[in-house]
Each structure stands twice: as structure tokens, then as C-alpha cells.
Image (cartoon, grey):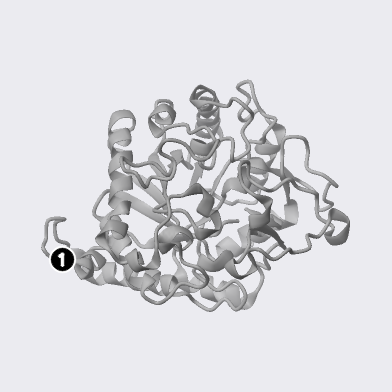
Amino acid sequence: MLEVTGAKFWKPYKEIGNPVPQPSAAADGKAQSDDTPAGMSADLYQYRPPIDLANPRLRDMARALGPAYMRISGTWANTTYFADTNIPPRDPPQGYGGVLMRQQWLAAIDFSRAVDAPIVTSMPTGRARAGGRALAARPSRLWLAFTKKMAERLPAIEYMNEPTLASMGGAPKGYDAAAFGRDFRVFEAFMRKEYPGTKILAPGSVGEANTGWAVATGGYGNLEVLTAADLAASTGGADAFSYHHYGAVSQRCTAMGYQTSADQALSEDWLGRTDQTLAYYRGVRDKFMPGKPFWTRRRQMRHAAAIRGRAPFWTHSGTLDQLGRLARQQVDVVIHNTLVASDYGLLDEDSFEPSPTSGARCSGAASWERQSSTRRSPTSPACTCMRIACAACPAVWRFLF
């Protein structure tokens, strides 16, 4: 979301430790925003202006990655206020951290159509919303109504981005699984009535597994963790089970632990973590949402091998390996974070040159088209190369917009 609106995002690794002047609302004409996630150091972020979605090269490169979904969401989306105007308010309304203007959303819709990437998103919930009024908040309804008016169909939507760490995403103090369930039921009823063609994804959990490396297991700093089981107890009517995979934590966040190293990036210990995460969430899915397919988001470049700077070419193999593993395990959609933002995008954020991971996305999809009739069982002795050939679902990239 923040690439559409402009906001603070992770500093490039080369900028960490360097003070960067931050523009004020008066300087850039944008609304003021409290856009550092709860529990995180403001020193890890720097302002980035809205991306130019009309850039011809960006469109050409994104189009080459399609067909795909474009996920416009992220932590910042939870507290983004939709203003149906082209004149930005000086400050976001109470409870919100940023503002999405009408022309910015129209630009995102136009880009989506131009590159054949329908928009998948999550609801702006706002810190101030409470008391079972999940969709009663006028800005949320206006945003969906405006999207519908523009004849833009949303293939899928989540109620909240990463409710596992709800307070990091801007939820009110004390927001728990019971409050999530209350709000989700209102959201689900509203979507089924007003937008029956849109799939509901839930619970959107993140960072859990039955291992010592799982970044959300046992707590994430001082932030309360809402477990997938507690959240999914209210999401049985959703169309797909959504979760986000974090194999480790970036070197930006060393103080949090859960680190790895580049020499482990192609090891079975590292590559197999995606299986362990899925196994954990499969147990939750089977109990509360039996038979529902999986949608997952992966953060290969930020967290995989805790790599600094642009990803080396060998990460291509790790990406293909993960796609192959997931394709054989009822995972319908894999969403990559991000298209261009920061050091781990599919495209370089300055030149839009493709990264090794974008090459993996294209070759993974092509491998499936050629090899779908020769899929082997997970017990096959073949190694990574066979998992690549078994990549049933193309990698679906996303922007951290």
C-alpha cells in the first residue's frame, strides 16, 4: 500500500545507520502519517514517494511477469484511510497512519489492468475502530464502493493484514482473537452480500511453526501474538486459508533474533522451513477450515539467508525449490514480497532491472506448463530439480503497496 500512497518503508541496507532527512507534509504536499509499525525502530525506515505507476518500463517488466495477482496490502494498509478526493487532508483522521487518494487508487487500478494483474488486498481497519463496527466505518465502505464503481473486481480480500501481530498493524490496545472474530463475522457478512464474487482469505496468520526458528512462536518482542488456531476458530466460512511465511528475520532486525546466514541459503534446513510452516498451518486448516486451499505469501529476499543488498543469482534456485514444494501441497497461490520495493523486489527499485527471483518466477511457471503431466510424488528420490519441475502454481508476485 505504501508504494501507492508514499510513506516510510525499510531503508535500503546501504542506508542503515545513515540519517536521512524526512520530508514534511508541507514539503511534499502529502498528509502527515504515523507510519512506523508498533514495536519497530523508526531508524530502520525512510520515506519513499509514491511510485510512478505510469512508467512504461515498469509496466513492460511487470507485464512480462504475468498473468498474476497484484497484492496491494501490507502492515501499512491496516491504517490507510481512503479519501475520495484529490485534495489530501493535512493529517489522516484519528486512528489512521496514512491516506490513499482517489487518483492514487485509480492509478493502481489502471496499472493492474495494463499488466494483467487483478488486485488482491486487505481492509483498512484503523486504530480507532472498535466495538464490532468492522465495516460500519464509512471510509472502508467508501473505498469498496468506489472500487466497484470503477468496475474493478477484486478476486480476493483479507479482513486484516497479519492479525497474528495485530498491534503492530495498528489494532487498538487489547485487541484479541475474540475481537478479531467479532469483526471478521461482520466483514464476512458484508462481503457476501455486497461483493459475492470476491473470495475471502483468512486468517492471514504469520510466522508460526512447531520449531525454534518460528519468528512469532513464543512472542515477537513485547507484542502479543494471536495464534492461528484462535483466529481461525472464527474464519470457517472463508474461501481459502491464507498465511505468510517468514523463514528468518532480516539483519535489519538482529535484536529480535531468529537469524540465519547466507551459507545456509541452499541447505535443506533452510529450504525445508517452508514445509514446516505449511505443516503447522495445515493442522489449523484441517481443524477449522477443512478442505480449503492455501494462499501464501513468502518473504524470500528479506528473510532468506538474511541477505544484505541485491540478491545473488543462486537465490533463483531457492525460489524455484520453494515453489515446487508448495505446488504439491494444495497451495493455490504464492505471492512474492515485493515487486520493486527495497532490496528484495522482483525488480530493482531504481532501474527496474529483473532480479534472479523474477527469473525464477518466469522459469517456474514455464516449467509447470511443460512438465505438469510428469508430476511425481513427494517421496520421489529426485531432488531440487524435480521439485522445480513439479511447480504446479506459478509464483504470484505482489507489491508491498
**Quadrant placement of the C terminus:** bottom right
Percent from the top left, x then y, of residue 380?
11, 60
What residue is at 33 percent from the left and 64 percent from the top?
Answer: 264
Image coords of residue 17 (percent x, y)? 66, 63
Q: Quadrant of residue 348?
A: bottom right
Q: Nearer the viewer, residue 208 or 3?
A: 208
**Residue 359: % across, % down:** 40, 75
248 lies left or right of 282: right
Classify residue 280 as left or right of residue 80: left
Between residues 7 and 139, which one lies in front from this camera angle? 7
Label 1 sits on a secondary structure element that is: helix
Taking the image as shown, residue 231 lies to the left or right of residue 190, namely left
Residue visible at 26% across and 57% down? 325
172 relative to 59, above or below: above
Q: Residue at x 59, y 73 (%)?
A: 58
Residue shown at the point (85%, 47%) measured from the top left: 90
Three-letter amino acid code at the position of disc 1: Thr
Q: Residues within 10 Å of mark 1 (few under 14, many from 20)?
A: few
Which residue was labeled with disc 1?
Answer: 374
> At which x and y percent is residue 127?
67, 34
Front residue of 313 and 391: 313
Query: Is residue 332 visible in the rendered structure shown here?
Result: yes
